[in-house]
Amino acid sequence: MKSKLKRLLKWELFLFVFLIGELLFFSMLTPGFLNLQNLLFSMNDFAYIGLAAIPMTFVIITGGIDVSVGSIMGLASITIGVLWMGGLNVWIALIIALFICALAGLLNGLIVAFTDVQPLVVTLGTMFLFAGIALVISGGSSATGYEGISGFPNSFVQIANGITFGLPNSMWLMLFILLFFGGLLHLTKYGRNVYLVGINSKAAKYSGIATKWIVLSTYILAGLGGGISGAILTSYFSSARSDLGTQAILPVITAVVLGGTSILGGRGTVLGTAIASIVVGMMNYGLQLSGMPSEQTTIVVGVMLIVAVLMRQIDLSYVKKLFYKKKVPRTKMVIKI
Amino acid sequence: MKSLLTKAIQVRELSIILLMVIYFLFVGSINSEFTSADTIVLLLNGSIILLILAIGQSFVLLTSNIDVSVGSIMGLSAAVCGTLLTSGANLGFVICIVICVGAGIGLINGIGVSYLKVPAIIMTLGMLGVVRGIMLLYTKGMWIEDIPNYYKKFARLEVWSIPLPIWIGALLIFISYLFLSKTKFGRYFYAVGDNADGAELVGLPVNIVKVLAYILSGISASIASLIYVMNIGFVTNQTGSGIELQVIAAAVLGGVSLSGGIGSVVGAGLGAIFFTVINSSLVYMKMPAYWNSAISGLLLLLIVVGDSQFQKRLKRGAHKNLKKLSQKKITLEESEHEKQTKALT
C-alpha cells in the first residue's frame, strides 16, 4: 500500500495530471484546441525549452546553475548562419556550432570546478561573454543583428518543421534527447555520481569520485544542450540571429525546477524536466492561442515557478498521514479477528 | 612595500579604485578626451541607475540571498511614474506611489524567501516574469511619452556644476554606508548573511532582516526608475529588462560576495561605476559598440576569478604562517622541556 501511494504521489504523475488538466482548460478557452494534430505540431513551438532544460537538469542536480545557456543558443544560431553564409555545408556548420557550444560549456565547467567562484557568478560572466561573442560574430560578418541570416536550404529547415512517420521531427528529437539523457542519468554509474556530488560533494570526493570532472562534464552537457536548442530554433525560424535565446532562461529554469529538480542539488529526474517543459510550453502556447500577448504569459510562467517550488516544500507526509489514519485501524481489526 | 600592495588588494574598495585608475589611464593614453572632467561627469551620470540598483542589491546579497527581479520592478515603477506624471499628478504623490510599488513587490519577494522558504533565485526569477507581465498589462505594451518638461528638467539641474542624479546617488550611498556600518541594525545584515542559524540562535530577527533587505532592493529599483524617467524622458516597454544581471555583475565586481556577509555598498557602487566605465570606454577607443558585452563579460570573469585565486593564496599563506608559528612553539616547548629535564638530572 505504501509503495502504491508513494507512486501515486510522485511528482511526475502529478505533473502529467496537471498537463491533462491544462489541456482541458485550454480546450474550453479555445474550441478546436484539443486536436491531436494541433497539439503535436505545437511541439515545434516549444521543443527548444525541453532540449535545453534536460541537460540543464544535470547541472542543477550537482547544485550548480547555468544562466549562460540563453547566450549559448544565440551563439549556436549565429555560428551556423555565418559559417553557412561563408560557403560551408550547413550540416558541417551545425556540427562545428555544436562543438563550439560544448567548448563554451567546457569554459563554464572549468571555471566552476577549479575556482571558488559561485556558478551563478561564473555563468553570469560567460553569459555576457558568449552573447558578446555572438554579437561580434554577427557584427563582424556584416549580418545586421536584428534581421539575421536567412535562406537556409530546405533540408535544414526540415529538422524542426518536417514530419517523420507521422510525427513532427522536433518530437522525435525531444524523445531521443529524453531517452539518451534519461539513460545517462538514471542507468549509468556516471549518473549516480552526478547525484552523489549534488547530495554531498565532500562525501563523494572522499569516496573516490572525481567530483571536479563530474561538475565540469555537466556544464559541457548543458552547453551542448543549449547548442542543440539554438540549432533547432534556427531551423524553426529558418533564420540565424545572435539574440535568439535572450528570453529563454526563464522558461528553461522553470521547466527544470517545475520538473522536481531541487535548486539546492541532489534531487531531480530527466522525465520530470521533460514533462514540465511540455507543461510550460503548452501554457505559453495555449495562452497565446486564447489571445494573450506572448510577453504577458510570463506572469503565468513566473507564478507557476514559485508555486511549484512552494508545493514541493509542503511536506507530502501530511497527505500520506491522512491516508494512513484511515487504513491503519482496519488492518489492526483484521489481525484481531 | 609589497605588504602595502597586498593590503590594498585585500581591501576591495581600494583595489577596484586602483583598477579603475589603471583602466582610465590606459584608455586615456589612446584617447585623451576620456580623462577630461566632462567625460568623467558624463560617465558618473550614466552609471547612476546601475549604482542605485547596486546599493539595493547589496543589502540582499549581504544576507546571502539574491534579487533578479529588480529590472522588472524598475520597469513597472517607471511605467507607473510615467502614467501618473502625464496625467498631471502632484510630484510628491507620484514619488510616494512609485516607491510604494517597489517596496510592495520587495515585500512579496521577502515574505516568499524568508517565511515561505522559497529559494531566492526561484522566488525572484518568478517575480521577474510576473512583474514584467504586469507592466505590459498595465501599459498595454505601449510606450509612455509626453513626460512633463518640469520633471525632465531635474536631470539637468546642477548643484556646483554636478547634476542632481549624481547627488542623489552619492547621498544614498552615504546613508546606506552609515546605516550598514554604524548602526546596530545595519550590522544584523552581515550577521544574517554570514551565519543565519547562528544569528537566529543569538536572537536576531533573521526573517525581518531578510524581508527588509528585499524591501530596500525594491525601493532602490523604484528610485532608479524615477531617475530613468527623468534622464530618458520616455518609458519603453522593455525598460529595465536585462539590467538585473548587470547589477549583480556590478556588485560582484565591487567585492560583494554572493555567499553573503562580505562586501559594502561603497564597493558595490564603485563596481557599478567601473562596469559603466568599461562599457562606455569602447566608443573612446574607436571600437564598434558590439564588442561591449564580450569585453565586459571577459573582464568580469578575469577580475572575479583573479580575486578568488588571490584570496585562496592569501589563505594558504596565512595557513603556512600559522603552521610555522605553531612549529616554533613546539620546538620552543621541546627545548624548554629538555632544559627542565637537564636541570632535573
Image (cartoon, rainbow, N blue to C red):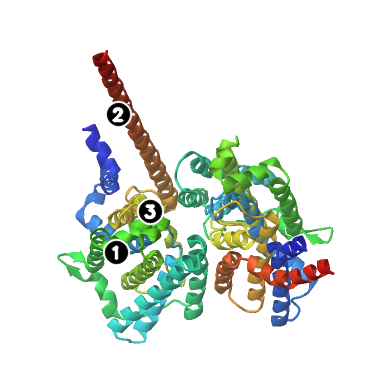
Inspect the image, locate mark 2, and give the three-letter code of the amino acid beneath it: Leu
Q: Is residue B50 above or below residue B315?
A: below
Residue B335, by quadrant, is top left
Q: Have a look at marks 3 and 2 and say if they share a chain.
A: yes
N-terminal label among 2 and 1: 1
Inspect the image, locate mark 3, and give the three-letter code of the amino acid beneath it: Asp
**Residue B300: image location, x then y, percent:** 40, 47
Give the residue pinned by disc 3. B194
In the rendered image, which quarter contains the C terminus of chain B?
top left
Q: Are marks 3 and 2 in contact (CB under 8 Å)?
A: no
N-terminal label among 3 and 1: 1
Mark 3 or mark 2, which is nearer to you?
2
**Residue A257: image location, x then y, percent:** 60, 60
| Residue plotted at (54% across, 54% down) | A264
CA gap between label 2 and label 1 equals 38 Å
* Disc assigned to residue B325: 2
* Chain of the residue where label 3 is placed in the rendered structure: B
Q: Have a look at marks 3 and 1 and say if they share a chain.
A: yes
Q: Is residue A53 above or below residue A319?
A: above
* Disc assigned to residue B62: none
SS state under label 3: helix
CA gap between label 3 and label 2 equals 28 Å
Residue A21, by quadrant, is bottom right
Give the residue pinned by disc 1. B185
